[in-house]
Amino acid sequence: MNYPIEAIRNDFPILTQQVHGKPLVYFDNGATTHKPRQVVEAMEEVAFRYNSNIHRGVHTLSNLCTEAFENARQTVASFIGAHNSHEVIFTRGTTESINLVAYSFGETFLQSGDEVIISGMEHHSNIVPWQLLQKRKGVVLKVIPVLDNGQLDMEVFRSLISRRTRLVSVTHVSNVLGTINPIEEIIEIAHQHNIAVLIDGAQAVQHLAVDVKKLDCDFYALSGHKLYGPTGIGVLYGKEKWLNQMVPYQGGGEMIQTVTFEETTFNELPYKFEAGTPDFTGAIGLAAAVKYLQNIGLQKIHAYEDELFNYAFEKLQALGNITFYGTAHIRGSLISFLLNGIHPFDAGTLLDKMGIAVRTGHHCAQPLMERFKIPGTIRASFGLYNTTSEVDALVNGLVKVRQLFG
Ligand code: PLP
């Protein structure tokens, strides 16, 4: 495949270092990805050239900064295929995006006894906000079960829908199983019943081309730091028709039109949901990350990562005495497994001594661990800069882990 891996790796200086005297092999991209020079330089340019608070100033730097911030919104909007850039709200990340919907959609549209459907493979960030809403408003939470192969039980999903169902909130790609959920089908079924759908895209947008217009989802959440952008910045895409009606999430500067002690009127979209000074430096960095991905091309990235995934899966399978979690036909980007008889934490600690970074534990999905009756897994999650020789290093590392444990 014509994939510029050398040039890509050169853009990520962090990858050239040694850890415990060994070349770093970074397979923890599901938790956070590294930042290319282009992202750091874009943020440096803000700090060194035009840092200034946005939207409020008449002076040159403020105007430059405002323009760069609003351009960043446009870049993100076209990246995810949003109709309008004012449907793109900058948040701190996926977690805040979901909390925003749980609060504002919940306060505006949900009554006691109304139902929200999530799935058994959700990250805690797509469980706890709904539980808080449950406590606040008496909303009922229903859960789509996960099959043994790591797919959602779509039969049960259909049967969970009732007259009182108001919202479905599911992950696009599982951060534990790698399953790519049939969100098109979920959205279609939900819409047949006039139910809104939120998609947690934290593990999707860095691997798959996403078009919210085609998907027709009502909300889509993502995090900058998982798509080679900065931490502390993320996005909530929401359809204008919902966002316009929803009550604000937080109060403060920027989200108002007029304030008196008697009454406040709220700003238009997207500002109504961006109280206080937003992380404009982060948003500009995120746009640089998006452009970086667009330059390589998401189709190309997806094809490359798919090859890497297949290579890794075959090699790991050949090791034998290994249990995989998530064997759905349509999956990718990460592999969750256990070396039979060895605790994932022990394996992860030994791999680290060999310079290999994997994630071990419950991956913020305790109900899913409970479902599979395991304490956690070892998760190797791939990024656009990983290579087959790094996969070989992981496999050799696992052989050594086994030897050390006899
Ligand atoms: N949803 C999924 C599927 C995730 O994998 C994560 C993070 O790992 C999150 C939500 C939360 O993302 P953040 O911590 O960036 O808000």
Image (cartoon, rainbow, N blue to C red):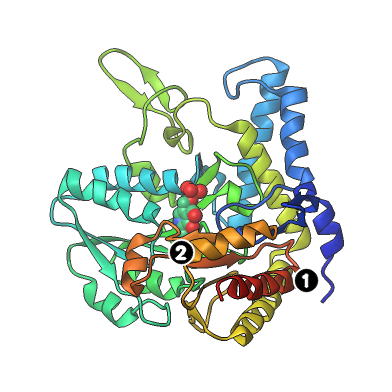
Is residue 180 shown left or right of residue 194?
right
Residue 206 sits above or below residue 1 on the image: above
The residue positioned 28% from the left and 12% from the top of the image is: 261
Q: Label 1 amino acid?
A: Ser
Quarter that holds the N terminus: bottom right
Q: Nearer the viewer, residue 144 or 340?
A: 340
Q: Give how far across and how far down residue 270 sits, in percent.
A: 48, 38
Residue 274 sits above or below residue 298 on the image: above
Residue 92 sits above or below residue 252 on the image: below
Q: Give how far across and how far down residue 129 sits, in percent.
A: 32, 48
The residue positioned 65% from the left and 46% from the top of the image is: 229
Q: Nearer the viewer, residue 145 or 364?
A: 364
Answer with mark 2 or mark 1, whichever residue precedes in sequence: 2
Q: Quadrant of residue 365?
A: bottom left
The residue positioned 35% from the left and 61% from the top of the image is: 366
Q: Nearer the viewer, residue 58 or 308?
A: 308
Q: Secondary structure at mark 1?
A: helix
Query: Does residue 49 appear in this view?
Result: yes
Quarter that holds the C terminus: bottom right
Task: Residue under label 2, please give it.
Answer: 216
Q: Give how far across and how far down residue 390 sits, in percent.
A: 74, 68
Task: Residue under label 1, please give it.
Answer: 389
Q: Residues within 10 Å of mark 2 (few under 14, many from 20)?
A: some
